[in-house]
Each structure stands twice: as structure tokens, then as C-alpha cells.
Amino acid sequence: MLKKIIFMSLISLSFLFQACGDNQEKQNIAAPNQFVLTSTDNKQYIIIQEKDGFILKDAPDKLIMFDIFATWCPPCKTSATHLTSLEKKFKDDLVIIGITIEENISNAKLIEFKKEYDAQYALVNSSDNRPLIDAIASSLDLNGRFPIPLMALFKDAKLITHYIGAVEEEFVESDIKRALGK
């Protein structure tokens, strides 16, 4: 009888600890529609995925452009200067976030890219890069593999437009102005 009580007590305790462990683990996981990105200068960006698109948590009224790129990609290198120019022109209305597709890239490599190609906008290197890239590609009906650079422009969590490959700065600027009603 004593063995039975001890056995039942141990089983009950194991369920108790298992439940506590699961709850703690769930508290540390970001919401499924939220992506936490850290830039090379340690600034944090929280991106929220809504039904039709994405917003920046701390600036939901701004346009957000995602630049999905790689440091080795020639068109990505060319686009960096143009994206810097656009972010400067629309600094009060636009946030550009460069998301590298490269797994396990060092911040030093991204900083080198930033300096060499004048990429003066946020370049992020986070564990949420791949999940966000996949979510953006899915929202554009691009499954699996796609060409880079891939840029997507959102306003009020709605897709404005997207670009695949190198695009003229004036073309992107025209779309930004139209999205802003200018």
C-alpha cells in the first residue's frame, strides 16, 4: 500500500513539473505573428504580421520596405545605395529593413557590406530572419525559392507592391510617393 502511494505521488509530481516546464517554455516563445529582429547596431525591430501584411510595432503608420538580400549578390550590392537614398528622402515616412538570407553570417560581415555599399538602413541578423522571409514570400505567393533581391513595400499592413531583382530607384520612389499620397 505504501509503495502504491509513493508511486502515485511520484507520478503526480512529474505531471506537475512537466506542466510548469511547458508553461515556462511557452512564455519565452514570441507570438506566432511577431518577429523580433536585431540590426547590426543592436537596434531591435518588432514586426507584426497581420492578415494581409506587416507593420512595424513601434511605427505602425510608416511604410515598411523589406529588402531580402545576400551580401554576395551583385544586384543586392547595387540596390543598397538606392535604398539608402530612398530612406533619406522619405525618412519621416519610410523604414527599410534589409534581411539577409545567409544563415550564420556574422555581424562583422554585414557591417562590412553596409560600409562598402553604403547601406545606411537597418540590416538585421536574427534567428527570426528565415521565418520572416518565409512569411513575406508566402504573402507574395512565392513559395520556396525565389530570386533576390526581393523587396516588398507595405503600408497599414497591406502590400503596396513588390520587386524582384534590380529595380530603378525612380520606379520605387514613384511607388512610395503614390503610397504616401504625394
Image: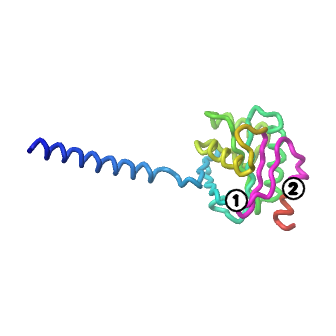
Q: Residue at x 67, y 62 (%)?
A: 59
Q: Position of residue 34 (x, y in %)?
A: 59, 54
Q: Position of residue 29 (x, y in %)?
A: 49, 50
Q: Residue at x 80, y 43 (%)?
A: 80
On the rendered structure, is 16 left or right of 55?
Answer: left
Q: Quadrant of residue 92?
A: bottom right
Between 145 and 107, the one nearer to me in the picture: 145
Q: Position of residue 13 (x, y in %)?
A: 24, 48
The residue that mark 1 highlights is 52
**In the image, is residue 7 above or below residue 55?**
above
Q: Position of residue 111 (x, y in %)?
A: 69, 38
- Please, what is the three-letter code of the amino acid marked with disc 1? Asp
Verify CB contact (< 8 Å) between mark 1 and mark 2. no
- Please, what is the three-letter code of the amino acid marked with disc 2? Glu
Q: Is residue 163 magenta?
A: yes
| Number of marks in the rendered image | 2
**In the image, is residue 180 above or below residue 113?**
below
Alpha carbon of mark 1 to alpha carbon of mark 2: how far? Answer: 23 Å
Q: Which mark is residue 142?
A: none
Which residue sits furthest bottom?
Answer: 181
Q: Quadrant of residue 74?
A: top right
**In the image, is residue 180 above or below residue 126?**
below
* Residue range highlighted in magenta: 148-173
Crowdedness near tag 2: few (<14), some (14–19) or many (≥20) residues, C-alpha within 10 Å: some
Dot 2 lies on which element? helix
Dot 1 lies on which element? loop
Between 72 and 163, the one nearer to me in the picture: 163
Mark nearer the N terminus (1 vs 2): 1
Considering the image in quadrants, where does the C terminus appear? bottom right
Q: Residue at x 65, y 60 (%)?
A: 50
The residue that mark 2 highlights is 173
